Amino acid sequence: MTIQVPRDDEGYLINPDDWNQDIAHELAREEGIELDEKYWPVLNYIRAYYTEHSITPDVRHVVKNMAIELGYEKKEAKKLMFTLFPYGYVQQACKISGMKRPRAWSTG
């Protein structure tokens, strides 16, 4: 499948509302990631946060949510985040969840 929605020069969606799970799978494949059930709590939280606040959540919020929802210690949740997305929250988690590229953020 080729993604048929507008993207910027780095491959991020220009309009996050164009996102769906098929696009997520294709974006993940481009990043060398095969999505399975471990990824969806992170991606779904990012999408829900964006829907509610109209901005991409900072990685701290996502890690905190992982700790609460999945029953991890915060340190374990952060480690899991970077196991799932080894090239970083912004480059992989934000991109795969259909966010625009966040500006000047800490990735961890």
Image (tube, grey):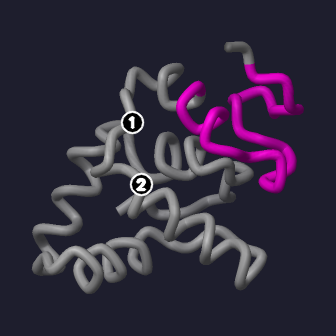
| Residue 99 image position (x, y, % from top left) | 68, 53
Q: Residue at x 58, y 38 (%)?
A: 24
Element class at badge 2? helix
Give the residue pinned by disc 1: 35
As drawn, is 22 to the left or to the right of 74?
right
Residue that extends furthest to the top in the rendered view of this protein: 1
Q: Quadrant of the N terminus?
A: top right
* Total numbered labels: 2
Name which residue lies at 41% across and 72% down: 62
Q: Which residues are magenta?
A: 3-26
Left or right of 56 on screen, residue 15: right
Q: Residue at x 86, y 50 (%)?
A: 15
The location of residue 90, given as percent across then percent down, is 52, 51
Q: Helix, strand, or loop for circle 1?
A: loop
- Residue 74 among those drawn in magenta: no
Note whether 100 is above or below 73 in the view shown. above
Image position of 103 with respect to 11: above or below: below
87 shown above or below 17: above
Q: CA distance from mark 2 to mark 1?
A: 8 Å
Q: Disc 2 designates what residue? A: 40
Q: Quadrant of the C terminus?
A: bottom left
Amino acid of disc 1: Leu
Q: Position of residue 51 (x, y in %)?
A: 73, 75
Look at the image and say whether residue 20 sits in the magenta stretch.
Answer: yes
Q: Name the amino acid type tagged 2.
A: Trp
The rendered magenta stretch, by its main secondary structure, is classed as loop
Mark 1 residue crowding within 10 angstroms, few (<14) / some (14–19) / many (20+): some
User: In the image, is 34 to the left or to the right of 29?
Assistant: left
Mark 2 packing: few (<14 Cα in 10 Å), some, or many (20+)?
A: some
Residue 24's tag is none
